[in-house]
């Protein structure tokens, strides 16, 4: 339910979910109400998140550093640098190919735009004002027998569905209205989604090669470990980290090895 409240695209839907949460657990409702809504909800983000669910950069780094675990610290640092560099190189090569093919947007933006365009062809449009290019768009709810109506304004770049305001990419309702008025909908997509901006993001030369370790300057400090701060217990320390699929894979492999060892007949 908390995820649904965070993902709600309109204030009305957000309040509906919050009332459901209050009915289930009043304490959770009070806890969420105490947090500033602009920091965790889409409908109150003031157009800053562009559809991004989390702003924690460590979540993105985790995707790059998969399996870089239980290794010496020097190896982890090397893996961090190398894999981050390779990730930028791959995206830079992709951006160059997009520019050579004269693509207006990267593939993920183009696919989302085309999906909305195909969906918009199923909508019904009732025009209201030609000067402001406003209309009421009616669409059938998937797998349902009722219809939903949305107010759309091309001059204000707004739609009641909230998707256009969320990430700036024209929603299916606005796309169908653009088709009715013979307006190029691509001009409403922010420039930050363009192939040019995509290439600039990954071709700024963030990474440079490191010299040989013999060429490094001697540090003017010395690391000293405070052993008194280490809490020593009998036996192996119990980890509080949440296990994920990598731990499950290692557990299954260990169980398989133990099973194979038990099947081997003893020679004594």
Image (cartoon, helix red, strand yellow):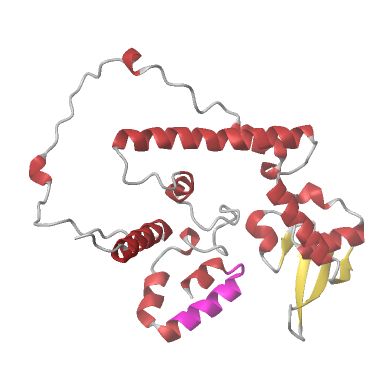
- Give the quadrant of residue 146: bottom right
Q: Which residues are magenta?
A: 8-21
Q: Is residue 208 visible?
A: yes
The residue that appears at 80% across and 66% down in the rendered structure is: 119
- Of residues 257 and 215, the one nearer the viewer is 257
Tell me if I can see residue 131 in this picture: no
Image coords of residue 169 (percent x, y): 71, 54
Horizontal relation, residue 261 to residue 188: left or right: left
Q: Position of residue 6 (x, y in %)?
A: 51, 67
Relative to 112, is 220 above or below? above
Query: In the rendering, at what x and y percent does residue 213 appear?
Result: 34, 18
Farthest residue, direction front = 267
Quadrant for residue 220, please give it: top left
Quarter of the picture holding the C terminus: bottom left
Say which residue appears at 32% left-offset and 33% top-offset: 74
- 116 relative position to 251: left or right: right
Q: Residue at x 38, y 68 (%)?
A: 34
């Amino acid at each position: 339910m908390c995820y649904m409240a965070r993902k709600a695209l309109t204030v009305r839907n957000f309040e509906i979910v919050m009332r459901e949460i209050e009915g289930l657990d009043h304490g959770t409702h009070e806890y969420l109400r105490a947090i500033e809504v602009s920091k965790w909800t889409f409908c109150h983000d003031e157009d800053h998140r562009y559809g991004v669910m989390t702003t924690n950069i460590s979540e993105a780094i985790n995707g790059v550093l998969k399996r870089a675990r239980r290794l010496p610290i020097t190896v982890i640092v090397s893996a961090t640098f190398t894999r981050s560099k390779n990730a930028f190189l791959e995206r830079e090569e992709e951006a160059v190919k997009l520019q050579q093919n004269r693509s207006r947007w990267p593939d993920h933006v183009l696919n989302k735009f085309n999906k909305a365009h195909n969906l918009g062809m199923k909508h019904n449009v009732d025009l209201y004002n030609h000067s402001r290019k406003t209309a009421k768009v009616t669409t059938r709810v998937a797998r349902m027998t009722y219809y939903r109506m949305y107010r759309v304004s091309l001059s204000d770049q707004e739609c009641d569905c909230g998707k256009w305001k969320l990430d700036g990419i024209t929603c299916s309702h606005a796309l169908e209205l653009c088709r009715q008025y013979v307006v190029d909908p691509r001009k409403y997509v922010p420039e930050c989604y363009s192939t040019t901006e995509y290439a600039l993001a990954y071709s700024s030369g963030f990474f440079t090669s490191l010299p040989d370790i013999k060429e490094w300057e001697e540090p003017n400090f010395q690391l000293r470990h405070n052993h008194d701060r280490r809490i020593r217990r009998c036996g192996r320390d119990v980890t509080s980290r949440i296990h994920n699929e990598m731990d499950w894979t290692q557990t299954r492999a260990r169980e398989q090895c133990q099973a194979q060892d038990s099947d081997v007949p003893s020679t004594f």
